[in-house]
Amino acid sequence: MGFVHHTDNANGYAAGDVPGIIRSIYAFHVQSNHWCDIGYNFLVDRFGRIFEGRYGGTALPVIGAHTGAFNTDTFAASMIGNFSTVAPPTATLNAMADLYAWKLGSYYRNPTGKTVLVAGVFAGSRFPTGTRVTFNTVSGHRDADFTACPGDRAYALLPTLRAMIAARLPHSAVSSRYATLGGQAGVLGEPILQGERIVPGGLMTQFQGGSLTWSSATGARRLSAPFAATYLRVGGPTGFLGFPVSRDEATIADGHGRSARFQRGFIHSSPATGAHETHGAIADRYALLGFESGVLGYPQNDVTTRPDGVGRYSRFDRGYIFYTPALGAHEVYGVVLDRWRALGFEAGVLGYPTTDPAPTADTVGVYQHFQNGSVFWSPATGPHEVRGAIRDRYSAQSWERGALGYPTSDERTVALGVVQTDFQHGSISWNLMTGGTTVTPTPVPTPLP
């Protein structure tokens, strides 16, 4: 709510006198009263000019020192002048109406309604500490404390001022949606921080219970508090995700999780994982895999840049999706993931995945290619990598479809400068000094006569 004040400065001052008047108010509040700044959030002169009082109040709900016992959850503007016997000029009233309409409208407050506040500690208060007091949303200083402020003539004009504010009150798609959700008594609760604000492409308001956003392309959309926290963590409407486009977040078919769709990605949540986003190529791949009902399950982190500064990844219940601009997005999971993880992910000998996991030609095994090697698995042999020149020779042998079959060992050193990988039906050795490779089939036993 807003309190109306006046200063004790004389009326009829010149425009050039105002800076000096404000400096004198600052000196009185800071040097005499030992406050940290001017007590009022705003000051308005007789020419209709609005000045910031306590620093930061134009962007945030800064607590002032304007109305003893009721500074919290309120703001105040002081009209420069003494309005005990003289009415405030029309220019002052118009500026006050503009100011209060902007401030109250940002938080969806009705200027002709009521507000309940709890009295704090202040010797000059009309109400004992802890008393719940019902005020007009726009009230005078004298309504709260033992004072004549804002002067008899100004106080008598408060009903007129409330009507002027109401006529100027901004209305938006966000405020309309907020009203349909029950306003302050609904699922979102009270607006917080900056109230409704313009963001590139639309509007946004943060609430105790979540957020509302609006753009002309998407309409007004609600996010719950966990989703809003994730959304804001990755930049909100100006970040990777853009504006929400689904009709608010929805419960997933499994009955446990929830999801929301955005212009450039998604947020999914479950009780076990919390709310996390996917965007860009990683989100596209996750969608093709069936989201949380596919092989990966729910995301366990937001899209994160890898230590090399090139790749990005998302971790899921049962695997990962890794992405680089050159290679695209590929998932890794299951036994292939176990081996790749043991080798150090993309920082290890294999590098980033270049394909998705796929069944082998005999449909018994699974394989996946990486920048510097491949991983093959079958129930009989387990997961093993083949890399470098050994992989090249294995490829020339038609992989597991050829005479060698599946790998049965990882690459190992067998002699000075020589490494080898064993297969079901032979081995491939690689001389690191000459670069040559040798295929050695497993000898076939000679039948007994």
Image: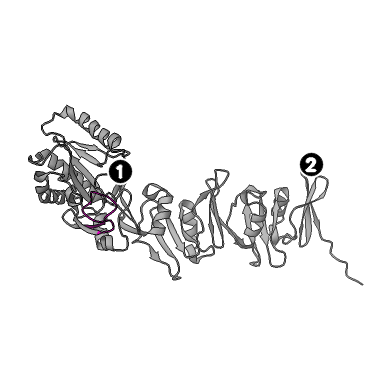
Q: Are marks 1 and 2 in contact (CB under 8 Å)?
A: no
Residue lying furthest top in this view?
Answer: 16
Query: Which one is earlier in the sequence, the residue at label 1 or at label 2?
Result: 1
Place of residue 268 in the rendered image (x, y in percent of width and height, measured from the top left): 45, 60
Q: Is residue 177 magenta?
A: no
Q: Which mark is residue 433?
A: 2
Q: Is residue 287 above or below residue 139?
A: below
Place of residue 78 in the rendered image (x, y in percent of width and height, measured from the top left): 19, 41
The CA distance from mark 1 to mark 2 is 68 Å
Q: Is residue 403 above or below residue 83?
A: below
Residue 361 occupies quadrant: bottom right
Q: Residues within 10 Å of mark 1 (few under 14, many from 20)?
A: few
Q: Is residue 129 magenta?
A: yes
**What secondary structure predominates along the stretch shown in magenta?**
loop
Q: Which mark is residue 72?
A: none
Q: In the rendered structure, which amino acid carries the disc numbered 2?
A: Met
Place of residue 389 in the rendered image (x, y in percent of width and height, measured from the top left): 72, 48
Residue range highlighted in magenta = 115-131
Residue 250 occupies quadrant: bottom left
Q: Secondary structure at mark 2?
A: loop
Place of residue 56 in the rendered image (x, y in percent of width and height, measured from the top left): 31, 41
Residue at label 1?
59
